[in-house]
Amino acid sequence: MDTEKSWVLWPEYFDSTLTRAQGRKVNKKLAVPEPSLEMISKALQKLGIEHTLEEEKSYPGEWYLKKGRALVPITIPKGQLLVKVGEILVRSQRS
């Protein structure tokens, strides 16, 4: 998938243990502790959103950790996508 035409979703965006300055992009209510790339992938599957996983990539702020990232085609605004994924992560964490 072309990174120029895709949203990049890093696990750090949804990590409740991180501050906004450290990379969290969603409200704490939509974040979970230490989400994995697999959790994000499952959330995207539940939403019916095509995506590609790049497991060897590192978030620039934590370049020494290879948590990976998901590439998602740009079909909706990134803010909406982050909220939808965050809601599913929180729901799946509770059950």
Image (tube, grey):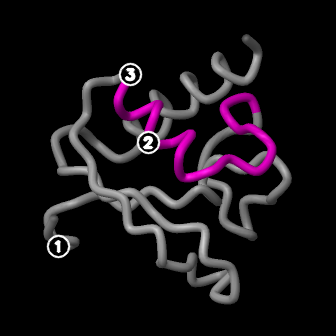
| Whole-percent x, y for residue 4 in the image | 17, 73
Q: In this view, does 39 lie to the left or right of 30?
A: left
What stretch of residues is rendered in magenta? 29-46
Question: Can you tell which of label 1 and label 2 is closer to the viewer?
Answer: 2
- Measuring 51% from the left and 42% from the top, which residue is drawn there? 40
Asked whether disc 3 touches disc 2, contact meaning CB atoms under 8 Å apart, the reply is no
Of all residues, the one furthest to the bottom in this rendering is: 64
> What amino acid is found at the position of numbered circle 1 in the picture?
Glu
Identify the residue under disc 3. 46
Label 3: how many residues lie within 10 Å, few (<14), some (14-19) or many (20+)? few
Identify the residue under disc 2. 41
Q: In this view, does 93 lie to the left or right of 41?
A: right
Question: Can you tell which of label 1 and label 3 is closer to the viewer?
Answer: 3
- Measuring 16% from the left and 64% from the top, which residue is drawn there? 1
Quadrant location of the C terminus?
Answer: top right
Element assignment for label 1: helix
Of labels 1 and 2, earlier in sequence is: 1
- Measuring 75% from the left and 38% from the top, which residue is drawn there? 32
Identify the residue under disc 1. 4
Of labels 3 and 2, earlier in sequence is: 2
> What amino acid is found at the position of numbered circle 2 in the picture?
Ser
